[in-house]
Image (spheres, coloured by chain):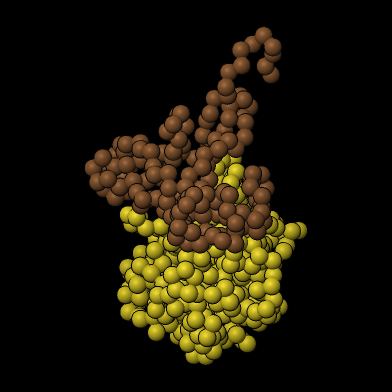
Chain colours: A brown, B yellow
Amino acid sequence: MSTGSSVEKPPRRVAIKGASLRLGEGEEALEGSRCPDCGDTFYPPRTVCLSCYHEGLDRVALSRSGTLHTFTIARLALPGAFVKAPYVIAQVQLPEGVIVPTVLDDVDTESVRIGMELELVIEKAMSDAEGNDVMAFKFRPLKGGAG
Amino acid sequence: MSSRVVVLGVGLHPFGRHPDKSIGEMARVAGLAALKDAGVEYKDVQAGFCAHVNQGVAAGLRTFGQLGMTGIPITNIELACASSSRAAMLAADAIANGLYDVAMVIGVEKMERGLLEGVGGKEFGYNDAMGINLMPAIYAMWAQRHMHLYGTKPEHFAKVSEKAHRNGALNPNAQYQKVISLEDVLASRMIADPLTLYECSPTTDGASAVILASEAAARKHTNAPVFLDTWVGGTPEYHRGEAAQAEGPNAVLAQRAYEAAGLAPEDVDVCQVHDAFSPGEVFLAEELGFCPEGEGGPFVWEGNTEIDGRIPINTDGGLLSRGHPIGATGGAMIAELTTQLRGQAGQRQVSDAKTALLHNAGIGGVNVMVLKR
């Protein structure tokens, strides 16, 4: 709890466990890894390249937009989940070739189509015990994108 | 390999809801049935393999111990929904290489009602927060992709479940022995489009037991052995830029099994596939080579996988109707195919079945087997 005498500091932003995010001002993005030898790219990031077995990959920001590879409309909520049914579980294909499991935001469930263009949204999911903002991500239809 | 391997005995504890029974009780029923079926005594069993997923420490001793305490090595095996077929593969490897004459696999599981927890353990993270760890969603997303690429229809998937329940109604060990119409499958509660409730396998309590023997040992007990002819296992292969499409490389493993067994897909008389969710049978009809890629939906819809069809699949009701006690499922698949090859399947018998194919998949690996008589 803050008191009147203490200085208000903005809460620190941390990525939710199981998501790899860059949260710096102006550079919000999914963070993957890229092989310096063969160029293959991965999300979530990994240490050993699956294509050439090079060890020690570079951390890279991934593209903020992609296309819908496949999806389903979940009609029941899982215990503890923040999303309310119905919601769209999706796999998003990024230009780097990686496929990211996520959910769609700000979308009419009945209008979802494979191939539609999507963009990344990073937003607060909850606060943790230390008062940090725990950040998660979704994708939403690209504004002005081909439906 | 020094010896051919025979499926000498199979046994089941009926699949269903058995909240008052321990895994030991269920394993004892399945195990005694398998011993009787094989015509051997427990003291003849030289090694035990206990397949389970969530039954805790020393489940092997708590199950095999119900049959006797003969001091044999007992090993616990976990490969998610493919645990007991993998246990049978390890037993078969040992027998083929001359380590044992007789080995026994017990698969067992007690499950809670409701949704399975996804992979990843207890720590609450992104997939939990976003509701992504929804098992039906995995198959539903593959199904959506299949519909997009090939024009497969929700009715094609639903047909798998209608057929499964019609077969399950003929199986006294099935969890659901009730015919469900196609309309009722489609009208049941939507879980994850296009999958409805009746297109999702249930949670189940049950046990399976399989006794494997060297050909020499088996010949003392039977003149008409059913051979476990070929077995191959695998895990997903990474291919740059491609999405993971299954629990493992199904088509690659099937091809390897066909080559090792000297078979082509059209030689298979009866088949078991992993229909944890209804699209499984549609995908596997293609991946196992029974129909061309993309044509699995119409292939199932037109009745090719019926008991009297071109390639009967899941004659005992499959996971959808027989039930899916995850650690016990692979053993139940072996039991059904063995029963079919012996001509003992009663109302669900495939006429003159000589060659059988088994596909059992889990998150973490796939097993393919060929059985012959």
Residue A70 in sight in this render: no
The single residue placed furthest to the front in the displayed view is A144
Q: Nearer the viewer, residue B26 or B253?
A: B253
The quadrant where residue B261 appears: bottom left
With respect to residue B83, does B227 lie above or below? below
Residue B277 in sight in this render: yes
Locate the N terminus of chain B and report the quarter of the image it occupies. bottom left
Query: How many numbered discs sit on the rendered protein?
Result: 0
Q: Which of B134 and B112 is in front in this view?
A: B134
Residue B85 x/y as whole percent: 49, 65
The single residue placed furthest to the left in the displayed view is A37
Q: Which residue is drawn at 55% across and 35% down?
A: A135
Residue B170 x/y as whole percent: 66, 82
Q: Which residue is drawn at 47% across and 47% down?
A: A119
Residue B210 x/y as whole percent: 54, 69
Locate the C terminus of chain B and report the quarter of the image it occupies. bottom left
Q: Residue at x 47, y 32 (%)?
A: A23
| Image position of B209 (left or right of B170) | left
Residue B40 x/y as whole percent: 55, 72
Q: Nearer the viewer, residue A46 or B262?
A: A46
The single residue placed furthest to the top in the displayed view is A5
Q: Which residue is drawn at 62% across and 31% down?
A: A127
